[in-house]
Image (spheres, rainbow, N blue to C red):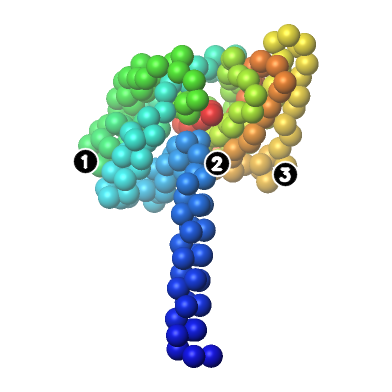
Amino acid sequence: MSRKTIFRVFILLFFSIGGQMSANAQTTTPFETVFDACKKACEALDGGFASGEQLLAVSKTLRDAAPIPLTVKQTQGDVLSLKGHLVFDYEFIQACVDNETIYEIADKYAAEARMRGDKDSTNKVRLDTKMVAAGQTCTFEIPSCSGTSQIGCVAEVNRSFSWKIKTIGYQSKSEREYKCNDSVRKGLPFRKEKVSSDERYKIIVSITNKSKRDGSFALILF
């Protein structure tokens, strides 16, 4: 094989791989962007040492993604304060870089995050932070969904959870359960699922904190 032929093969491979990488990057959905950012926030805070550079990058990603507040009704479990826990919000995460006392006013940041953005906007990823006591289960109702929805949950650092999801149609009242596998029942730090229906529906998600400590959890919907 001549040098010219080898060079041409190399160029073709280079552009083929580059094109595939570009295509993969372009297929990242708003849901995946926010879901991954929440995971990376926990990674940056793991071990008790915050990585300022990583936290700033995560904060920027969440700010640019601009998730809007997720409307959630808690129907089971104690409503706990977020004081001392991670809030999955770009302003809170940015403040973690140089403010060690930020966790003391976590509820303030969570309340401000719930006021940001247009709750009635369509085709937007939605985000909220919820608390679940150690070993307890909280159930949340997400109203007015249609078509296919992606739902995700990310636990704060050193927490794990199991969950149960079902959809209930508004007109037919029919229910569909999305069962967990064994690894999820034992507890995982993050999880995502797709649900769908031919009619408008609400999502019922029950989160069980498998940890020995209370924990905050990001709920994400798209």
Q: Position of residue 123 (x, y in %)?
A: 50, 25
Q: Amino acid at mark 1?
A: Asp
Q: Which mark is residue 98?
A: 1
Q: Amino acid at mark 2?
A: Phe
Which residue shows up at 39% across the image and 34% down it?
65
Q: Which mark is residue 71?
A: none
Residue occupying the far bottom of the picture: 2
Q: Which mark is residue 190?
A: 2
Residue occupied by mark 3: 182
Residue 58 located left or right of residue 186: left
- Per the image, label 2 sits on a secondary structure element best described as strand
Q: CA distance from mark 1 to mark 3?
A: 40 Å
Q: Position of residue 25 (x, y in %)?
A: 47, 50
Name which quarter of the figure residue 157 lies in. Answer: top left
Which residue shows up at 45% across the image and 89% down it?
3
Q: Amino acid at mark 3?
A: Asp
Camera-side residue of 88 and 58? 58
Q: Is residue 50 visible?
A: no
Q: Residues within 10 Å of mark 1 (few under 14, many from 20)?
A: few
